[in-house]
Amino acid sequence: MRINLGYVALIMLLPLKIYGQQTLSADELFVKARTAAFDNKDYPTSITLAKQALEKAPNYTDISIFLGRIYTWNKDLKSARSVFDELGKRDVRDEDYFIAYASLEYWNDQYPKAIEILDKGLSYHPQSEGLWLLKAKVYYANKQYIESEKAVKTILTINPKNTEANSLAVKINDLTSKNAVSITYNYSHFDKQFDDDWHLVGVSYKRITPIGSVILRGNYANKFAQNGTQIELEAYPRLSKTFYLYVGGGYSNDVGLFPKYRTGVSLNANLPHSFEAEIGYRQLYFSNSIWMYTAAVGKYYKNFWFNLRTYITPDNKNISHSYTATVRYYTKSAQDYFAFQIGTGISPEESRNNLLENETYKLKTFKVGAEYNFSVKRNLFSLGAMYYNQEYLPNTTGSQFDITLGYTRKF
């Protein structure tokens, strides 16, 4: 009888292979479980490996917390809660345990339960940025904006450079008070282009509604030694946790000082990793319509906010471009910051946008400026200055100096 030596060798080695797998340590199995979950997204295999590790080390807390997380990601909520409840009975006090368990309840809209878990965790880890941040997110999702703001302020007291906390603080800023009244004053001086200085005063009322904020604004201008008024209405309806709209319009009977009417719509997105983006249009009508298309991207990093915005204005002959870069440095809250701005071109958001009627938006413009905002309880103050070097005629430039003052009262 002929014997297949390869087959015999395989049979002899198979027990050794099985034995080798059985003798993997809990740590080695844990590593394999993490690889299966994070690299391969193979949650069933990861769960099996984690269970094998716990058979070898039943009190290995990190593996139990990991298993609860994997059950959560695999949408097996009953098993996940069973793991976390068992850890609770063992009086586990690890920070990761409270974050993992509260995240499960937060992601499944069980906000009171999530807060209960986080409060217990904070009793053991009062300086935990992770626990405070998750608490702020839970309150924000449950529309408890004042409580969310308190949690964010605690984080920023612990670490003013916490990127996510600064990003969330800005989102909460407009939601903690239902009403706000503002007044702004803008002064413009020209060295060559115009003989008379410009004055613009704006008064606005802002109301927070269940679907987003609405702003009614009235503007008074003194330009070219003439007076004029404008009325504007803006809204920021929320579409989802990620998306919201900007919708705005304005009307004036004093064409030349203001556009006859203006409209604008933008889609805004709050993106992962503290990014944000916007795309939309602005339209100004004097004797003809000027259409501008805008796009912007922003990023929070520690207590900085970076933003780059462009306006593109096409016509029959060419395309005009405007670019503005803005950097903000937040000091203690979303209302307290220094800002620096530099750019080219004219923006329809600026008070000088009536210049667009004569197509000066196609000429070269350079601008640079700074702003300081600070708060005293519910009173907000702002001071800004901007310098423009404007080509108001082909190959002819002049300078413009702007100063802007603002005050807002929230209630």
Image (cartoon, rainbow, N blue to C red):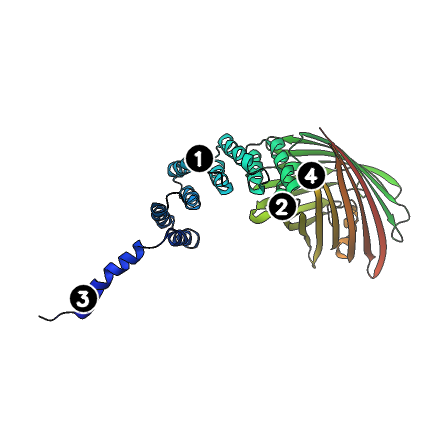
Q: Mark 2 to mark 3: distance in Å? A: 63 Å
Number of residues whose C-alpha sits closer than 10 Å to that of mark 4, classed few (under 14), some (14–19) or many (20 or more): some
Q: Quadrant of residue 398?
A: bottom right
Which residue is more in the foreground, 319 or 213? 213
Give how far across and how far down residue 363 sits, in percent: 77, 57
Residue that numbered label 4 is attached to:
249
Q: Mark 4 to mark 2: distance in Å? A: 36 Å
Image position of 240 with respect to 33: above or below? above
Residue that numbered label 1 is attached to:
88
Give how far across and how far down residue 395 sits, in percent: 83, 62
Q: Pointers 2 and 3 in contact (CB under 8 A)?
A: no
Q: Pointers 4 and 3 in contact (CB under 8 A)?
A: no
Q: Closer to the camera: disc 2 or disc 3?
A: 3
The secondary element bearing badge 4 is classed as: strand
Which residue is more in the foreground, 146 or 263? 146
Give how far across and how far down residue 232 sits, in percent: 72, 36
The secondary element bearing badge 2 is classed as: loop
Residue 353 in view here: no
Image position of 8 with respect to 270: above or below? below
Q: Mark 1 to mark 3: distance in Å? A: 52 Å
Give how far across and how far down residue 23 sits, in percent: 32, 55
Q: Quarter of the image containing the N terminus?
A: bottom left
Image position of 166 with respect to 310: above or below? above
